[in-house]
Image (cartoon, rainbow, N blue to C red):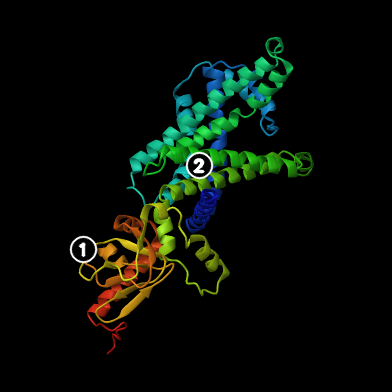
Amino acid sequence: MRRKKNFALVSLQRLYITWESFLGNGLFTYASAGAYSFFLSALPMLLMILLILVRVLHTSPRAIQDLILEIGFNFESLDMPRFINSITSIKTIGLFEIIIGITIFWMARRFFASIQHGMRMIYRKQGKKKPLKDNLLVIAGEVILVILVVLMSIFLIAGNAFFHSVLSENLLTPYVFHLFRNLFRFVPFGIMFLFVFLVYFFSPRRRPNIKHSVQASAACTITFFVVQLIFSSFVNLSRYNLVYGILSNVIVVLLEVYIFFFLLLFFAQFQYVVQFFESFLLARLYLLPAYDNPLIRRQLERIMFIKPPVFYPQYAIKQRKGDVIFTLGDDSTDLYYVMNGIVRMTLPNQVIEASYGQLFGEFSSMIGGKRTSTATAHTDVTLLKIPARLFRETIEIDGAMSRRTLKMVTDYIRKSNQMPLYIDLEE
């Protein structure tokens, strides 16, 4: 029971931090830019895919049209038979065709560049900027997506032909036939999962755990599938076709593309939070709201993060009343968080107490110097002894924590030098 409760709490903490980071990074705007870039890249990519299917793989134009009808997307705005006939009419490839092909390929980069920009925004504090690698990833992503769509099209065309043939009825029982027929419709989502996984695993500047990428990709794909089901159950496309005509498909596709980009970036942010969850969690403990904070939202944050189950098995220690945790001048650099009890810190000119939900010892963790006070257990206490390494990593990731830490160091230096807090430059 406790394990299930801890799992639910950790999941809630991760989702909350993900949403806060998603808003803080302005990923709503990147999702909109990604949807817009998709429409700029959709036609060039469609041209490339059809060219490969018809000219290179000699796929039947009729098979392509049947596949489009099977998918259910309405191409009334595009004369597909005439378009395919124009491709097949090209007998030789000259310099002009090569230039057009390169131009189309270059135009399709917008889609992948938008994805790369969003991923760079999420991982901007991890890894170094490598322009050459980023550009190569954009080109590689475009090539991989075209290959995946071509393979999916071939698979769907072959499967569609098989299920419409007499052979399938003779080989499969009616139950197995309908089962495979329904599973066959999930092939595009399988391709989507593979593409999203490649984006999550190869785009970040700091390579994530493959398990995290698989989980985030599966969550993104499944959520998109569920959203599509909900959307199709509420939206009557026939009525929209009467009102908007051929633009109804554009409106629906634009909304679905935006939802896809939203989910793509949201679960990319979720992967980042999971990857550096200890640092995010420590930042929440360091910036934990006071128990008398009047804002309801801040009180909910305090309830959510004040007991970190992830840290407890790794860092929890118990001290009896009167035990010395560290003394003035010690070389230790660990950071401490009070789970219960009271710790008294004796400084040269004052005495400070740290109680439930408070941290102490961060100054030595920050600068790696000697302790500036003596910490003693005023009561029986349970502490989290957090390594300085994690504290420094957290400062690099969380901007609010780094600002507060800098203020702490500045205040300490001012007090040590007995400098006034404000200096009037006119005096």
Q: Can you say whether 7 is above or below 217 in the image?
A: below
Sooner in the amino-acid sequence: mark 2 or mark 1: 2
Q: Which of 161 and 139 lies nearest the eye of the viewer?
A: 161
Q: Which of 94 and 258 lies nearest the eye of the viewer?
A: 258
Return the residue found at the far bottom: 427
Q: Position of residue 68 (x, y in %)?
A: 66, 27
Dot 1, crowdedness within 10 Å: few (<14), some or many (≥20)? few
Q: Can you say whether 181 is above or below 256 in the image?
A: above
Query: Can see residue 108?
Result: no
Q: Can you say whether 72 is above or below 426 in the image?
A: above
> What residue would you read off at disc 2?
216
Q: Can you say whether 151 is above or below 125 in the image?
A: above
At a point 63% along the width and 38% down the height, the residue shown is 225
Q: Which of 277 and 21 lies nearest the eye of the viewer?
A: 277
Q: Position of residue 17 (x, y in %)?
A: 49, 56
At a point 34% along the width and 77% down the height, the residue shown is 352
Q: Quadrant of residue 88?
A: top right
Residue 81 relative to residue 315: left or right: right
Quarter of the rendering occupied by the C terminus: bottom left
Dot 2, crowdedness within 10 Å: few (<14), some or many (≥20)? many
Hey, what amino acid is under mark 2?
Ala
Q: Nearer the viewer, mark 2 or mark 1?
A: 1
Residue 232 relative to residue 422: left or right: right
Q: How many marks?
A: 2
Q: CA distance from mark 2 to mark 1?
A: 41 Å
Q: Quadrant of residue 414?
A: bottom left
> What residue would you read off at disc 1?
331
Q: Quadrant of residue 286?
A: bottom left
The kind of secondary structure element at disc 1 is loop
Q: Position of residue 277 (x, y in %)?
A: 43, 52
Residue 186 relative to residue 282: left or right: right
